[in-house]
Image (spheres, grey):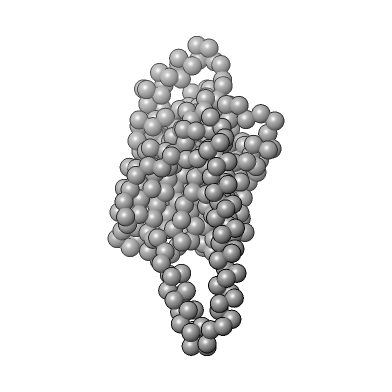
Amino acid sequence: MEKSKNRREFLKVGTIGSIGLVTTTMACASETTTEEHDSIQAEGETSAKEINKPIVVSTWNHGLDANKAAWKVLDEGGSALDAVEQGVRVTESDPENGSVGLGGRPDRDGNVTLDACIMDHQNECGSVAFLQHIENPISVARKVMEDTPHVMLAGQGALEFALEKGFKKTNLLTEKSKEEWEKWCEESKYKPIINRENHDTIGMLALDKEGNLSGACTTSGLAYKLHGRVGDSPIIGAGLFVDNEVGAACATGVGEAVIRIAGSAIVVELMRQGKSPQEACEEAVNRIISKHKNVEDMQVGFIALNKTGEYGCHAIYKGFNIARRDQQDEGMVDSTYENE
């Protein structure tokens, strides 16, 4: 908690200093000539164009490999939409992941059910919920967005749609996930474990060379959940939200908590009000804490990216991290957090 408080005190001081600087600048500006004012304005417009793009950020360690695929698209001048789709497909097709696509942990009845959504810079979006037998639900979600008048398809209807679009049925329950589920069945004791149950959910946000934002989110959800449970990942405004005028955000963790505050939409709206991506993520996490009587064993993390390529991340508990790649370098970033 001290770490987070210290950061907020720093931001507070920085804000006060900025106000003083703006006041002084305005006073000086009143004494400038018309020519000097035009020169200053031109310099400001030039600075405003210095945006950190392209850039891609995604959740957890496996985001590094996902970012590589996304970066290939962005570096070649491709769209943020194509980048986030190709990026998260890497994680969906990795059988070693425990909570995304192939190899995802099943529900308590042994069924792997998937949720995903995607959203572009024009507020076009698509999602699938409770989808079975399809390895890459993010691509099905994009088909929903582009080929139907709807936003979400669920269950058997989503599967039938995917098959009609040429997706192949796949056995998503790997031997490793099956063995873990069978072991769990011996006790059938359900209790979420921080940074584990939704650890492999992947959310990805990208800003392309054209300055457009897009995002994607995909998961198999909480391990050993009730059959039919759907979390925040396929819900626009909860697990993901993009507004090209402001920024984008996505969430990971216990989806029920994210849904209760429309988490990702809240983060974007906080950025619209002037908060930085970091400040917006912190406020959303604190809102979740304030809306729950007890957050013990409840991990939630947010990541955000704004139109200038600035990003932020914050979680209830330590252990959350994000992967980042831009023109300078790539690497992991440990999230700030509220509780030990």
Q: With 178 as the anchor, is 243 left or right in this view?
A: right
- Of the 4 image quadrants, the one containing the N terminus is top right
In this rendering, is residue 330 above or below 225? below
Q: Image quadrant of residue 260? A: top right
In this rendering, is residue 28 above or below 69? below
Q: Is residue 161 visible?
A: no
Identified at 42% across, 45% down, the residue is 58
In this view, the residue in front, 236 or 242, is: 242
In the rendered image, residue 105, in percent from the top left (x then y), is placed at 45, 27
Identified at 43% across, 19% down, the residue is 180
In this rendering, is residue 62 above or below 312? above
In the rendered image, residue 263, in percent from the top left (x then y), is placed at 60, 45
In the rendered image, residue 223, in percent from the top left (x then y), is placed at 50, 27
Identified at 54% across, 49% down, the residue is 10
In this view, the residue in front, 8 or 282, is: 8
Identified at 45% across, 16% down, the residue is 182
Q: With 203 as the anchor, is 19 left or right in this view?
A: right
Q: Is residue 306 visible?
A: yes
In the rendered image, residue 327, in percent from the top left (x then y), is placed at 32, 57
In this view, the residue in front, 121 or 163, is: 121
**Residue most extreme to the bottom:** 34
